[in-house]
């Protein structure tokens, strides 16, 4: 039950026998309602409140950090297309069977999907550059920039106390697999958050994700 007005400190109300913390009323169930139990409920409330803050603010903070665009999407709405694994097997990037972050060493589609679905929210990070899509040197530099920026933003989130994070890179990055390895449909993902992915406008777009 929400109380009004909000109360910042935890107090016990004499009339109701309730505990109030940050605008929530916590019932005093019995004399054995210990401080430990109360702390557990308060911790869960704080976690829930922090989750709301994350959904509202990390996208804006990412744009301030240098990304062209950013948005949050529930992980359950990421579309996985198992058939995309065939593109990795074509090995056009040269990383298949070489890097631990790439298939087949990174895991089967089913295993990687299960690892992804452990998380609730995907922070979608996008950068766009004006470049020739066939300029491999520019492509490589842009992917490195995207992954470095993503790694730096992850560190910022970790400083906020979010330690269980999963990065999907724009291409493999250290221990992070790329979106292609996870078989995520990038176009449908971009459509879901009203971003451009493929467009005949002379620009190339790079996506990375942070799952939390």
Image: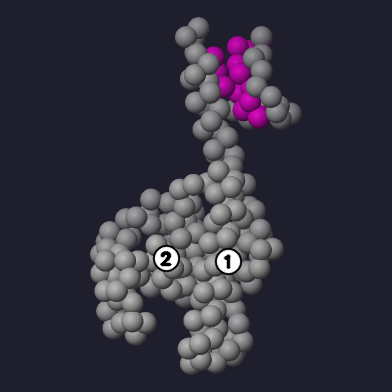
Q: Which residues, given as a range, are shown in magenta?
A: 15-28
Q: Are marks 1 and 2 in contact (CB under 8 Å)?
A: no
Q: Residues within 10 Å of mark 2 (few under 14, many from 20)?
A: few
Q: Which residue is mark 2?
A: 174
Total labels: the figure holds 2
Q: Is residue 140 above or below residue 45?
A: below
> Residue 5 sits in which quadrant?
top right
In the displayed structure, 131 sits above or below 189; it is below
Q: CA distance from mark 1 to mark 2?
A: 14 Å
Q: Nearer the viewer, residue 197 or 95?
A: 95
Q: Along the horizontal axis of the image, is 84 left or right of 3?
A: left
Quadrant in which the N terminus is drawn: top right
Work out whether residue 120 can be spotted: no
The image quarter in which residue 129 lies:
bottom right
Badge 1 is on which residue? 149
Is 204 placed above or below 49 here?
below
Let me know if residue 18 is in the magenta part. yes
How far from the left and from the top, in percent, is residue 181? 35, 70
User: Residue placed at 54% from the left, 86% from the top?
Assistant: 138
Looking at the picture, how far across and down is residue 31, in whole percent?
A: 50, 7
Q: Position of residue 152 (x, y in %)?
A: 57, 60
Q: Is residue 38 above or below residue 130?
A: above
Q: Secondary structure at mark 2?
A: loop
Decide: few, some or many residues near mark 1? Use Cα within 10 Å; few <14, some 14-19, many ≥20.
Answer: some
* Label drawn at residue 43: none
Q: Nearer the viewer, residue 27 or 98?
A: 98
Q: Is residue 69 visible?
A: yes
Q: Is residue 66 magenta?
A: no
The image position of residue 82, as x and y in percent, is 29, 70
Which residue is found at the position 55% from the left and 33% from the top? 45
Q: Secondary structure at mark 1?
A: helix
């Amino acid at each position: 039950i929400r109380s009004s007005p909000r109360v910042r400190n935890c107090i016990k109300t004499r009339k109701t026998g309730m505990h109030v913390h940050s605008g929530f009323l916590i019932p005093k169930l019995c004399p054995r309602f210990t401080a430990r139990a109360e702390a557990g409920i308060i911790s869960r409330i704080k976690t829930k409140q922090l989750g709301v803050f994350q959904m509202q603010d990390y996208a804006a903070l990412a744009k301030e950090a240098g990304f062209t665009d950013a948005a949050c999407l529930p992980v359950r709405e990421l579309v996985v297309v198992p058939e995309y694994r065939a593109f990795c097997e074509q090995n056009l990037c040269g990383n298949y069977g070489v890097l631990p972050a790439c298939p087949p060493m990174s895991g089967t589609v089913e295993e990687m999907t299960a690892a992804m679905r452990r998380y609730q929210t995907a922070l979608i990070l996008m950068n766009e550059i004006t470049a020739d899509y066939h300029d491999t040197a520019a492509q490589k530099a842009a992917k490195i920039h995207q992954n470095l920026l993503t790694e730096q933003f992850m560190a910022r989130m970790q400083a906020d106390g979010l330690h269980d994070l999963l990065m999907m890179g724009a291409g493999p990055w250290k221990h992070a697999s790329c979106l292609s390895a996870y078989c995520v449909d990038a176009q449908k993902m971009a459509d879901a958050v009203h971003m451009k992915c493929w467009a005949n406008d002379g620009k190339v777009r790079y996506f990375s994700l942070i799952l939390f």
